[in-house]
């Protein structure tokens, strides 16, 4: 509905489509109830209602831009997002569909909060399996209080739990994912990274393999941002251009180096903890050694932060660092080196890379890891 009270033909059609989608979602809930005995019906209900509340708020970007009540700052960000979105399909071969062509103001800093958990003496995340989506290593909640409550329940059971705010997520092409107020005002590079990452999930998806899916999207986002900044720096028709564009690229390289260094630090400690948990010993000795490793991690992070002249960007993440935090980081990065190497072998040709990844996605998880020369780890349940 427009601000003046009229309803366009396009919006009427969208509402009809939305109604059909609601019926489909309801059918999934009923099926889930039959399968699970309704033990998780409340979780499914909040997921469906939260998603449809979000997409029901979305309006076409051009309608938001024409609205006299839209702040100029938002109009500028939407114009930038449109340019990034067009670049994604034109230059990166990402899907050209309705995703990120509508905007919703959701009125909160994150669209969902994800809860990761692990056993006390394991670095492997606990999986949660759902109809259609398969198994994932987190549970998502549209209300932070619900996510914190779930994390508390995990902790009471003796597990490590980590809650992370998520500015956007992908529905894998089932719906047209909108631009959201939770990320549209992020710095240009972060906005581009997010759009490229989420669109990549529509290119290839391996059921029940979060590490493969997230690592693939992370490789696409980095390659996409690099190309976006090269284009921005070298084209006089876009801003920033010239020296400003070069400065943006330099800032991106600094942020990228920090992100990789931080990720490498956490993955290194994940390996050390994994070795500890796989070694002989009683619970008391493991608990003591675990605490010592996390104390060492805090010290190493402080040294890394000092090398960045005190850059505090990862301080919030490090508060209460535990197995579940490391599991969440591994879920997004563990296969990045292998997939980056695959991109290099394709001479950084993205369509060829996508075809190779789609082939890998059709394999079993064990077969995929074998292609990378890796062995599967047990997954906690």
Image (tube, helix red, strand yellow):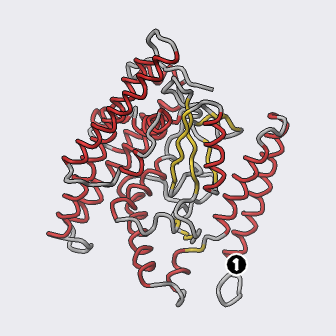
Which percent across, then down, holds residue 144?
A: 61, 55
Q: Can you say which quadrant of the picture contains the N terminus?
A: bottom right
Q: Is residue 189 above or below residue 201?
A: below
Q: Element type at marker 1?
A: helix
Of residues 243 and 40, the one nearer the viewer is 40
Horizontal side, residue 221 vs residue 144: left or right: left
Q: Can you say which quadrant of the picture contains the C terminus?
A: top right
Q: Is residue 56 above or below residue 304?
A: below
Q: Residue furthest top?
A: 280
Residue at 44 percent of width and 73 percent of height: 78
Q: How many marks?
A: 1
Which residue is tagged 1?
A: 9
Which percent across, then down, holds residue 104?
A: 57, 70
Which percent across, then down, holds residue 124?
A: 51, 27
Residue at 46 percent of width and 14 percent of height: 278
Horizontal side, residue 229 vs residue 318: left or right: left
Residue at 14 percent of width and 69 percent of height: 243
Q: Residue furthest left?
A: 243
Of residues 146 and 357, the one nearer the viewer is 146
Question: Quarter of the image holding residue 347?
Answer: top left
Which percent across, then down, holds residue 192?
A: 38, 59
């Amino acid at each position: 509905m427009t601000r003046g009270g009229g309803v366009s033909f396009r919006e009427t059609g969208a509402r009809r489509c939305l109604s059909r989608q609601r019926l489909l979602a309801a059918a999934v809930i009923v099926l889930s109830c039959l399968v699970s005995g309704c033990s998780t019906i409340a979780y499914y209900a909040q997921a469906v209602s939260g998603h449809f509340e979000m997409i029901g708020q979305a309006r076409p970007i051009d309608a938001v831009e024409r609205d006299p009540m839209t702040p100029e700052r938002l109009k500028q960000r939407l114009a930038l997002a449109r340019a990034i979105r067009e670049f994604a399909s034109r230059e990166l071969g990402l899907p050209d569909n309705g995703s990120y062509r509508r905007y919703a103001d959701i009125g909160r800093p994150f669209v969902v909060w994800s809860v990761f958990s692990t056993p006390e003496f394991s670095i492997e995340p606990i999986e949660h399996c759902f109809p259609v989506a398969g198994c994932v290593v987190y549970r998502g909640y549209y209300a932070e209080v619900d996510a914190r409550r779930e994390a508390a329940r995990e902790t009471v059971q003796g597990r490590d739990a980590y809650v992370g705010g998520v500015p956007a997520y992908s529905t894998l092409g089932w719906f047209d994912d909108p631009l959201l107020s939770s990320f549209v005002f992020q710095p240009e590079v972060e906005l581009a990274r997010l759009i490229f990452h989420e669109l990549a999930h529509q290119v290839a998806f391996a059921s029940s393999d979060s590490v493969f899916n997230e690592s693939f999207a992370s490789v696409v986002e980095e390659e996409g941002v690099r190309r976006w900044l090269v284009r921005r720096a070298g084209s006089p028709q876009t801003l920033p251009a010239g020296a400003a564009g070069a400065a943006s690229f330099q800032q991106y390289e600094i942020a990228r180096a920090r992100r990789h260094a931080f990720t490498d630090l956490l993955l290194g400690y994940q390996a050390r903890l994994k070795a500890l948990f796989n070694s002989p010993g009683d619970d008391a000795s493991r608990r003591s050694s675990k605490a010592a490793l996390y104390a060492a991690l805090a010290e190493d992070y402080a040294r890394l932060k000092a090398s960045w002249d005190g850059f505090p960007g990862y301080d919030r993440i490090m508060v209460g660092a535990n197995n579940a935090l490391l599991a969440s980081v591994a879920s997004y990065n563990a296969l990045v080196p292998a997939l980056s190497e695959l991109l290099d072998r394709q001479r950084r040709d993205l369509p060829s890379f996508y075809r190779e990844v789609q082939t890998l996605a059709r394999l079993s998880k064990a077969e995929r890891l074998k292609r990378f020369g890796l062995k599967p780890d047990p997954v906690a349940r």
